[in-house]
Image: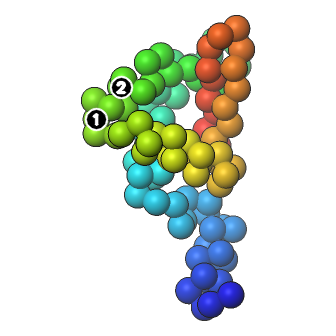
Amino acid sequence: MSEPQAILSYFSAINPLAGLSSTALRLYSALEVFRTEYRSPNEREWFRAPQLDLELLKIGFSKSEIEKGITALVDADLLQVRNAQNIRWYRLK
């Protein structure tokens, strides 16, 4: 492993946001807004995001950026996604 990769790996272990793409970081921030507005009444750490794609498209995300960003956040263990009763729920860490 090269020195820059080792440094990035070290900082990622401390702060999982380190090393994420700018798109993933923007998506994380956008999801914070949904988390506040659409919180589950029963499980406060989970939130739904009605028309997530439409809302994110309005602020400049493409469909592929949304998919890649969600995958990056899940891979970094910063986001959990589940489906319950035909509703997609999210949990940011």
Quadrant, the N terminus: bottom right
Percent x, y of residue 87: 62, 14
Q: Quadrant of residue 70?
A: top right
**Residue 22, labelled with which disc?**
none
Percent x, y of residue 76: 65, 54
Furthest toward the front, the residue is 64
Residue picked out by circle 2: 55
- Work out whether 31 lies above or below 77: above
- Work out whether 70 lies above or below 19: above
Furthest toward the bottom, the residue is 3
Quadrant, the C terminus: top right
Inspect the image, locate mark 2, and give the three-letter code of the amino acid beneath it: Glu
Regarding residue 37, the answer to whether it shows in the image is: no
Label 1: which secondary element = loop
Q: CA distance from mark 2 to mark 1?
A: 7 Å
Percent x, y of residue 58: 28, 29
Name the residue located 28 percent from the left edge and 39 percent from the top edge.
Answer: 60
Q: Quadrant of residue 86?
A: top right
Q: Nearer the viewer, residue 62 or 60?
A: 62
* Cβ atoms at labels 2 and 1 below 8 Å apart: yes
